[in-house]
Image: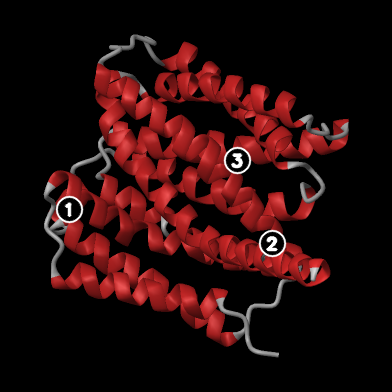
Amino acid sequence: MSSQTSRAEIGNLQTSDGLAIRLMPAVFVWLWSTGFIGAKYGLPYAEPFTLLLYRMLVTLVLLALVAMWVKSKWPSVTAAFHTSITGLLVHGFYLGGVFYAIQDGMPAGLVSLIVGLQPLVTALAAVVVLRETVVWKQWLGLLLGLVGVSLVLLEKMGGTEQMTSFPLWTLAWALIALFAISIGTVYQKRYCQGVELVPGAFIQYCAAGALFAIGAFAFETRVVDWDTQLILAMGWLVLGLSVGAILLLMQLIRRGAASQVASLFYLVPPVTALEAYILFDERLGLLAMCGGLLSVIGVALVVVKKAQ
């Protein structure tokens, strides 16, 4: 009787673990989408590099405590070097590029559209660097996702006249963000597989924090208005994004092909549009809903593996 009970308990645990693994992509997409909402709440009270620097510092304190609590194994010097490169790309140049493109006048929708090309760039890089096989259904899914994102953002921008209202150099910031997170995703998959999640994230944030510190002291006044809205936004950016979403992203990269993980980013603009509708009463029209549906279909074609 006891052995049957034990087998039943093990089966329940395995079912629970399997459900948690299947929910990981959906939870990641939701968490990642809230980063744009948190930035919208926080940026009026601090400059981009300054805001990101404080975000990194608070996150590092939390991760250090977690690392001591779980007694994490720290990587070798070589692995730590590769992890810091990943941090500079996935956090430093990506976040810095996005925040400064918006700060310098580029519409957030257009920044999202450019960065939304990431799954295609990552898929190409994964084929070249990791020799990953991307079948025709996955390429079709990537293209459908791109079309879906374009439809969502086309409606959100409300026209093309906004595209001429920003300096040309802001395009460079957006492209830096695009290529940084694309290359960083592939680099993480190639060189950082053996690094534990918490120490890996800590090292990545140290590297990104150093970059933000240089940027803040070189280009910004570092003046912060510690309004309640900023504090709440900072709390969510740290706990929801820098801790929750990033640890999930690193785990997803370990478990899946880089091109499959990258395709999840196609779902972020539709989810963000829905959140903006709920929080800021931004209208969701037929075009955006069709784009969101195309994005879901595209991600499904990339992520769902062919039955064996």
Asked whether residue 63 appears in the rendered view, the answer is yes
Which amino acid, mark 2? Answer: Arg
> Could you say which quadrant of the image residue 149 lies in?
bottom left
Q: Is 101 situated above or below 251? A: above
Q: Which of marks 2 and 1 precedes in the sequence?
A: 2
* Eye-nearest disc, 2 or 3: 2
Q: Secondary structure at mark 3?
A: helix
In the rendered structure, the answer to whether residue 186 lies left or right of residue 3 reads: left
Where the C terminus falls, by quadrant? Answer: bottom right
| Residue drawn where x is 48% and y is 82% of the image | 140
Nearest the viewer among 163 and 38 is: 38
Nearest the viewer among 212 and 203 is: 203
The spot of residue 254 in percent (x, y) is 70, 56
* Eye-nearest disc, 3 or 1: 1
Asked whether residue 125 appears in the rendered view, the answer is no
Task: Bin the neighbour count of mark 3 within 10 Å (Cα to Cα): few under 14, some 14-19, many 20 and up.
Answer: many
Real-space CA distance between mark 1 and mark 2, rounded to the nearest whole angstrom:
33 Å
Which amino acid, mark 1? Answer: Tyr
Which mark, residue 48? Answer: none
The spot of residue 65 in percent (x, y) is 65, 22
Write down the residue under mark 1: 277
| Residue drawn where x is 40% and y is 27% of the image | 235
Q: Is 136 situated above or below 230? A: below
Write down the residue under mark 2: 255
Kindly check if marks 1 and 2 are in contact, taking CB atoms under 8 A apart as contact: no
Kindly check if marks 3 and 1 are in contact, taking CB atoms under 8 A apart as contact: no
Q: Which of marks 1 and 3 precedes in the sequence?
A: 3
Which amino acid, mark 3? Answer: Leu
Write down the residue under mark 3: 89
